[in-house]
Image (spheres, grey):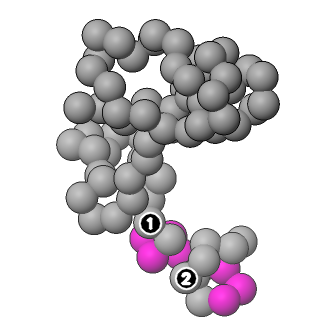
């Protein structure tokens, strides 16, 4: 079951709640008991080796691939 993030319009408390996708946009009750909480857009991001996309088009070359620079080329400064 997905985890959704909500913000209470009364007290601005942000909280998460597990619920079925069919109820994702239904109002929620905040931990303080207010019935005026609405779902907010949350951002999910991953990083690391497994986070690369299958297409590398448009990606910048790694700093090691650049040459020159005052520090030996490792940071691509020019």
Q: Which residue is found at the position 23% from the left and 32% from the top?
A: 1
Label for residue 1? none
> Which residue is pictured at 78% across the width and 31% down the height?
11
Q: Residues within 10 Å of mark 1 (few under 14, many from 20)?
A: few
Looking at the image, can residue 7 be seen?
no
Q: Is residue 15 left or right of residue 44?
A: right
Element class at badge 1: loop
Q: Which mark is residue 62?
A: 1
Report the residue that reaches farthest toward the front. 33
* Residue 50 to residue 37: above or below: below
Q: CA distance from mark 2 to mark 1?
A: 9 Å
Q: Seen from this angle, which residue lies furthest right?
A: 11
Label 2 crowding class (10 Å Cα cut-off): few <14, some 14-19, many 20+? some
Question: Are dots 2 and 1 in contact, CB under 8 Å?
Answer: no
Q: Which residue range is magenta in the image?
A: 64-71
Characterize the magenta stretch by its predominant secondary structure.
Answer: loop
In this picture, residue 14 sits left or right of residue 49: right
State the residue in front, 34 or 47. Answer: 34
Q: Quadrant of residue 77?
A: bottom right
**Which residue is label 2 attached to?**
74
Q: Quadrant of the C terminus?
A: bottom right
Residue occupying image coordinates x 71% and y 86%: 70
Task: Indicate yes or no whether the magenta region holds residue 62.
Answer: no
Drawn side of residue 72 relative to residue 5, left or right: right
Q: Earlier in the sequence, mark 2 or mark 1?
A: 1
């Amino acid at each position: 079951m997905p985890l959704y993030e909500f913000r209470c319009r009364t007290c601005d408390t942000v909280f998460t709640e597990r619920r079925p996708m069919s109820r994702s946009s239904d109002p929620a009750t905040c931990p303080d008991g207010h019935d005026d909480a609405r779902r907010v857009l949350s951002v999910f991001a991953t990083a690391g080796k497994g986070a690369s996309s299958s297409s590398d088009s448009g990606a910048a070359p790694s700093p090691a691939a650049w040459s020159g620079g005052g520090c030996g080329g490792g940071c691509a400064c020019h």
